[in-house]
Image: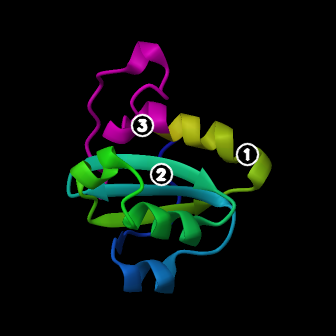
């Protein structure tokens, strides 16, 4: 199942504070044409700010320029995150995907 969330927003402090909800869901960080990371949280705004602060070397190296999110209930987040990781193969989620799909490259849809 493809991305069913928000439009993309700039991955900067102002945009995160303005657009990222403090709600349960899945968030994706990417650059033009490349998925960098897909995460899940009960407070997406808080986690996006944490990542922006440099808490992950891979994401810092991947230099995401945009983010998007899907509102997803807490009990469904883990399954939905796994579906998206398997479909889009973000570089900083390596090892979280189904081993049969590793190495597959997926283009951005927007």
Mark-to-mark CA distance, 2 and 1:
15 Å
Q: Which residues are magenta?
A: 85-110
Question: Quick check: 85 above or below 27?
Answer: above
Q: Looking at the image, do the residues carrying marks 3 and 2 touch, with CB atoms under 8 Å apart?
A: no
Tell me which numbered mark, 3 or 1, is placed earlier along the sequence: 1
Q: Nearer the viewer, mark 3 or mark 2?
A: 3
Q: Nearer the viewer, mark 3 or mark 1?
A: 3
Tell me which numbered mark, 3 or 2, is placed earlier along the sequence: 2
SS category of the residue bearing label 1: helix
Residue 13, horizontal then vertical, whole percent: 38, 80
Quarter holding the C terminus is bottom left
Residue 44, horizontal then vertical, whole percent: 58, 65
Q: Please, which residue is most extreme toward the top here?
A: 100
Tell me which numbered mark, 2 or 1, is placed earlier along the sequence: 2
Mark 3: few/some/many CA within 10 Å (<14, 14-19, 20+)? some
SS category of the residue bearing label 2: loop
Q: Which residue is mark 2?
A: 3
Q: Which quadrant of the view contains residue 23?
A: bottom right
What secondary structure prevails in the magenta region? loop
At x 46% / y 48%, what residue is drawn? 38
71 drawn magenta: no
Q: Which residue is mark 3?
A: 93
**Residue 76 marker:** 1
Mark-to-mark CA distance, 3 and 2:
16 Å
At x 44% / y 25%, what residue is drawn? 95
Residue 36, horizontal then vertical, whole percent: 32, 48
**Residue 10 marker:** none
Q: Which quadrant of the view contains residue 105?
A: top left
Residue 57, horizontal then vertical, whole percent: 32, 47
């Amino acid at each position: 199942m493809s991305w069913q969330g928000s439009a993309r927003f700039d991955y900067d402090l102002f945009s995160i504070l303005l657009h990222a909800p403090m709600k349960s869901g899945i968030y994706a960080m990417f650059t033009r044409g490349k998925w960098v990371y897909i995460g899940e949280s009960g407070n997406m705004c808080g986690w996006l700010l944490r990542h922006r602060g440099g808490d992950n070397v891979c994401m810092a190296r991947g230099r995401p320029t945009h983010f998007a999110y899907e509102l997803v209930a807490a009990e469904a987040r883990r399954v939905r995150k796994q579906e998206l990781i398997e479909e889009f193969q973000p570089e900083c989620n390596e090892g979280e995907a189904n081993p049969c799909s590793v190495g597959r490259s997926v283009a951005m849809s927007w």
